[in-house]
Image (spheres, rainbow, N blue to C red):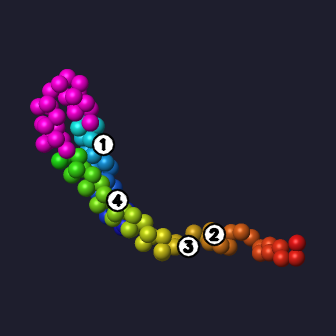
């Protein structure tokens, strides 16, 4: 049930990350091209348009990451019975070497 609910959140996370990275690259390289080609209009146009898209993508990615991180902590508190010993029991017998 949880995986069905979390699939849209994962999709939104990856979509937001892709939008954020691509629009960020457009802003950076567009501004670089504007500086190198001495086109101040490109710099201001990218500041007005692509920067808000990059900010929206990053905000979406952060919100989804928060939800996914919170659900991972909840799942970690509810261990499943897999038959595998817990990490504290996996060391084997106690080998305390006080006398050595």
Residue 81 bears which disc, if any? 3
Residue 56 bears which disc, if any? none
Residue at 37%, 62% (x, y): give it: 68
Q: How far apart, in angstroms, are the residues tagged by discs 4 and 2?
A: 27 Å
| Eye-nearest disc, 3 or 4 | 4
Q: Earlier in the sequence, mark 1 or mark 4?
A: 1
Label 3 crowd (10 A; few <14 / some 14-19 / many >=20):
few
State the image coordinates of residue 71 (x, y, percent, origin top left).
39, 68
State the image coordinates of residue 96 (x, y, percent, origin top left).
80, 75
Q: Is residue 7 left or right of residue 82?
A: left
- Residue beneath disc 2: 87
Q: Is residue 46 left or right of residue 85?
A: left
Viewer-nearest residue: 48 or 77: 48
Residue 4 image-quadrant placement: bottom left
Q: How far apart, in angstroms, are the residues tagged by discs 1 and 2?
A: 38 Å
- Residue beneath disc 4: 65
Residue 21 bears which disc, if any? 1
Q: In the figure, 79 relative to 63: above or below? A: below
Label 4 crowd (10 A; few <14 / some 14-19 / many >=20):
some
């Amino acid at each position: 049930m949880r995986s069905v609910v979390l699939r849209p959140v994962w999709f939104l996370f990856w979509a937001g990350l892709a939008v954020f990275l691509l629009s960020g690259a457009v802003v950076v390289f567009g501004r670089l091209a504007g500086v190198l080609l001495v086109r101040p209009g490109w710099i201001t146009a990218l500041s007005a348009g692509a920067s808000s898209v990059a900010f929206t993508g990053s905000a979406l990615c952060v919100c989804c990451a928060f939800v996914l991180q919170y659900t991972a902590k909840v799942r970690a508190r509810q261990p499943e019975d897999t038959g595998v010993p817990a990490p504290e029991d996996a060391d084997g017998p106690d080998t305390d070497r006080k006398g050595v």
